[in-house]
Amino acid sequence: MAGVELRQVKKSFGDVDVIHGVDLSIDDGEFVVFVGPSGCGKSTLLRLISGLEEITSGTMSIGEQDVTHTEPAERGVAMVFQSYALYPHMTVYDNMAFGLKMTGHDKSSIDERVQKAAKILELGPLLDRKPAAMSGGQRQRVAIGRSIVRNPKVFLFDEPLSNLDAELRVQMRLEIAKLHNDLDSTMVYVTHDQTEAMTLADKIVVLRAGIIEQVGSPLELYDNPDNEFVAGFIGSPRMNFLDGEVTSSKKGSAAVVVPTLGNLKFNVSTRDRTPEKGEKIKVGIRPEHFISGTGAKHKFKAPTSVVEQLGGNSFLYLNIGGDIPLTVEQKGHSEVRDGQVATVGVDPTTTMIFGNDGLRI
């Protein structure tokens, strides 16, 4: 096991800069998830750690050893790809053993490692099967087992669950979490899936256009995003952003008005900066932070375009003008029907505001 240190790491493809001076520390035994939109550089950053891409400038160490220019096979990392990349003509046992055979391990050592990995991943009864006779989830477990047998310092996962259906993704997510607990190994995981990031990570790294926007635990990023981008990216469904204006302010709080919610007025807490009176802002409210309009001090009414009844919770999509409806989550079954006017309450303590520069106020 080992930690990973990146210092001013940059990556360019010709004249195109993809990774812009990334500084990142990954602790020994930590589970770190890279998230961000397509093209943000998360897979490229993972490939830089693995050595499959060469760093343009900067330094990288794994376990306090400088690996900036070290070959992939000598870095002590193992990578699990989105595609299973299994040899179709080989059995599960041979697929997991192949890499060890190529590096000259003796037969007893190979058997011990393969049997241990098979036990961890519950692949024992499948060792004589070939990939064609297995489900997608089983094939992905074999791909993970092939990494385990190498006893790597760091596990790297590049969207390993993307090819699985929804039910299998849930099952494999739980298995990867259990694997991390059992092995206590350093793991770096790339995904675009919110649920995977929030449930698996000790630490989430949010990337945009090759720059780290924020690093923190899942709940830190959810509760205290530094900017509008992180606030909108972390959380599903995404945060609602509404145009607002500051009507008065003092250190630590501001009074705001939101025209699209019927000129609703309320006070919100502020952080480092005190906004100016008349300043145009974005008001961020998560769908799950709306409250019942019955008896709420701050409430508004809006017509409902669509109601999604999911059993345990419901989603109301309210027409407040503009192209994007307001998303409101309610617990349990909603009594509101499509086309009806809904009365919804706002809890100012959960509301965030952002400046024109996108930074949290």
Image (cartoon, rainbow, N blue to C red):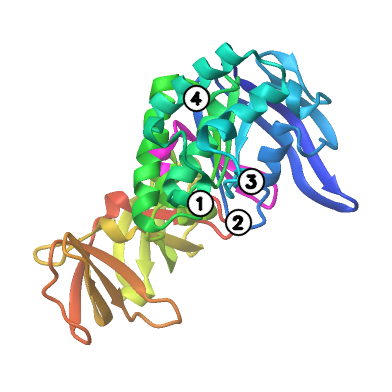
**On screen, 301 above or below 49?**
below
Category of crowding for the residue at label 3, using alpha-carbon neighbours closer than 10 angstroms: few (below 14), some (14–19), many (at least 20): many
Which-is-in-front pick, marks 2 and 4?
Answer: 4
Distance from label 2 to label 1 (Cα)? 52 Å
Category of crowding for the residue at label 1, using alpha-carbon neighbours closer than 10 angstroms: few (below 14), some (14–19), many (at least 20): few
Whichever of labels 2 and 3 marks the residue nearer the N terminus, that label is 3
Q: Are marks 1 and 3 in contact (CB under 8 Å)?
A: no
Which-is-in-front pick, marks 1 and 4?
Answer: 1
Category of crowding for the residue at label 2, using alpha-carbon neighbours closer than 10 angstroms: few (below 14), some (14–19), many (at least 20): few
Question: Amino acid type of disc 1?
Answer: Ala
Which quadrant holds residue 173? top left
Q: Position of residue 124 (x, y in %)?
A: 39, 30
Closer-to-camera residue (82/53): 82
Q: Is residue 131 magenta?
A: no
Whichever of labels 1 and 4 marks the residue nearer the N terminus, that label is 4
Left or right for 177, reference 330: right
Distance from label 2 to label 3 (Cα)? 24 Å
Category of crowding for the residue at label 4, using alpha-carbon neighbours closer than 10 angstroms: few (below 14), some (14–19), many (at least 20): many
Distance from label 1 to label 4 (Cα)? 34 Å
Name the residue at 60% across, 56% down.
357
Distance from label 2 to label 4 (Cα)? 33 Å
Disc 3 designates what residue?
Answer: 42
Q: Are marks 2 and 3 in contact (CB under 8 Å)?
A: no
Q: Name the element at disc 2.
A: loop
Disc 4 designates what residue?
Answer: 30
Q: Could you say which disc has been placed on residue 132 in the image?
A: 1
Closer-to-camera residue (50/125): 125
Q: Quick one: quadrant of the N terminus?
A: top right
Name the residue at 70% across, 45% down.
44
Q: Are marks 1 and 4 in contact (CB under 8 Å)?
A: no
Whichever of labels 3 and 4 marks the residue nearer the N terminus, that label is 4
